[in-house]
Amino acid sequence: MFSQETLLFQAALPKPDALQVVFAFPNRYSVGIASLGYQVVWRMLKTRPDVAVARLFTDGYEPLPRTLDLVGFSFSWELDFTHLLSLITQLRIPLLAQARTDTDPLVFGGGPVLTANPEPLADFLDVVLLGDGEELIHELLDALGEVRHAPRRARLERLSQVPGVYIPSLYAVSYHGSTQGVQAIQPLGAAPQTVSKRTWRGEQLSASTVVTPQSAWENIYMVEVVRSCPELCRFCLASYLTLPFRTPAVSGSLLPLIEAGLKVTPRLGLLGASVTQHPEFEAILDYLDEERFAPVQLSVSSVRAGTLTEKMTTLLAKRGAHSVTIAVESGSERLRQVINKKLSNQEIDRACAVALAGGLKGLKLYGMVGLPSEEEGDLEATQAMLLHLKQRYRGLRLSFGCSTFVPKAHTPFQVYGVDRQGDKKLTRFERALVRTGVDFRPESYGWSVMQALISRGDRRVGQILLRVHELGTSLGGFRRAFKELKGQLPPLDWYVHEDWSQEAVLPWQHLLGPVSETLLTRHLDHARTFMDPLPVV
């Protein structure tokens, strides 16, 4: 699998005494190598002469060193936890951090899931990197190099002094009771009281460091056009956790990156939570519309419906795209006000017209059920919107991907639970849309529940994850684990479905995102001013 890679950087020759590192992705190679975050961190490791790095995936690995100083994981999806535990075991490292000795490597993890809430995996990770890795990775390696041969505890204490590095074992968590919430989180020794997420503010964002036909997106070169999102939808981790919104200069940064990538592949992906909100996005379109780029296949990540233009859809169609994706969340105007989705039904309607006029064959819409305060009228509004769009734009293939609301740490809706009726609501949509011609694509409600458990859990959830790893990852495995551990931690219902008090000590209270709890509360209070439900029609 590695032999087909084209590298876009010059790897360094490791020194004889280089740190021995394994950098893993807890999934298949095709999935991991499609992760821009994984690619970028791997390049940073690979270009340091004081580091010798080997990659590890669930289906393959590079030659692994006999002794290790450091094992790292790029962790992007909550439900990949079982692969993470399996890979730690494969490397013959004790699963529990407390069982590791001075001769065992330090195990670290990073990525958006761990930045938001690493507590469910606290028992398994020695080190967690919070936030952007551009500077943090280098500072971690420099600090580790200083104490490489020191006792394990001394290494961890030194790393805890690096801003953005969180050492779970240096914090003691107490609870109101074995089946109740967190009482307090106290640092031990010289560990800082709180750890703040690191934010990269450099002029250049990320771009692919490797291109391969073995990627889930074959031979694609990816460029990060924006980081974060200025819209601040109340449920959105990708917006709140990654602030501030950052946009590199087109001529000085983006276009040279694109030019370099298109020398090795004709497939280009523009990435970001809201790429069309780059202030110079029109200039990017003009550049890619040049005749010399006629062979290029262009794709973009989800775009804000109100920013979709015929100029953009025309270029996408010319460059091989068949559809574009917009997130609408709901057809209810009231519910979109609740979640701060600055979007009207008229703008969604116009997005369909623009897609069709530009020559695209399809439009993918993403929505949710179970958003806070959702009522019958909101569901009916979504169904009516989809039916209207399908009838009016018959030449456009419409698909509706629908998930269940999952609360995320560091967002205003972190205190809300998962809707107990979410499964029934997804089934209702499926029945209502089956004969309309709208391609309905629901996400699994059961796995959304388990995602919420990890997203919202404290470190006691690690006991559940360990038992599920032993039993086999299935919904039944989770239920059995909770049954076996009954009385030792809160029930699944408390973690997933209950609304929590705003005064509660949250499991991630000591880990600071870019938005203060005071401001999150203010945004939540504003959302609640729109929570009077629609009447049932």
Image: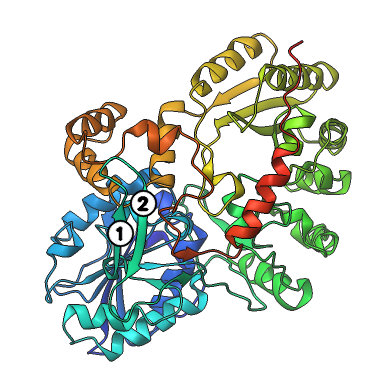
Give above or below for 236 relative to 164: above
Please name the residue shown 74% across and 42% down the image: 341
Indicate the position of residue 303 as horizontal and vertical percent values: 72, 46
Give above or below for 480 relative to 88: above
Q: Residues within 10 Å of mark 2 (few under 14, many from 20)?
A: many
Q: How crowded is mark 1: few (under 14 residues within 10 Å), some or many (20 or more)?
A: some
Q: What residue type is labelled 2?
A: Val
How many dots with numbers? 2
Q: Which amino acid does label 1 sit on?
A: Val
Q: Name the residue under label 2.
A: 182
Give above or below for 210 relative to 183: below
Dot 1 falls on a residue whose secondary structure is strand
Dot 2 falls on a residue whose secondary structure is strand
Front-most of 59 and 182?
Answer: 182
Q: In this view, does 200 lie to the left or right of 213?
A: right
Q: What is the quadrant of the C terminus in the image?
A: top right
Please name the residue shown 30% across and 45% down the image: 461
Separation of marks 2 and 1 at Cα, in angstroms: 7 Å
Query: First in sequence: mark 2 or mark 1?
Result: 1
Q: Quadrant of residue 49?
A: bottom left
Name the mark on residue 268: none
Indicate the position of residue 263 as horizontal and vertical percent values: 62, 68
Please name the residue shown 82% across and 59% down the image: 291
Indicate the position of residue 399 as horizontal and vertical percent values: 66, 26
Residue 268 visible: no
Q: Do the residues labelled 2 and 1 touch (CB within 8 Å)?
A: yes
Q: Name the residue under label 1.
A: 173
Indicate the position of residue 177 as horizontal and vertical percent values: 28, 45
Q: In which quarter of the image is residue 330?
A: top right
Q: What is the quadrant of the N terminus in the image?
A: bottom left
Q: In this view, does 262 lie to the left or right of 408?
A: right
Front-most of 117 and 106?
Answer: 117
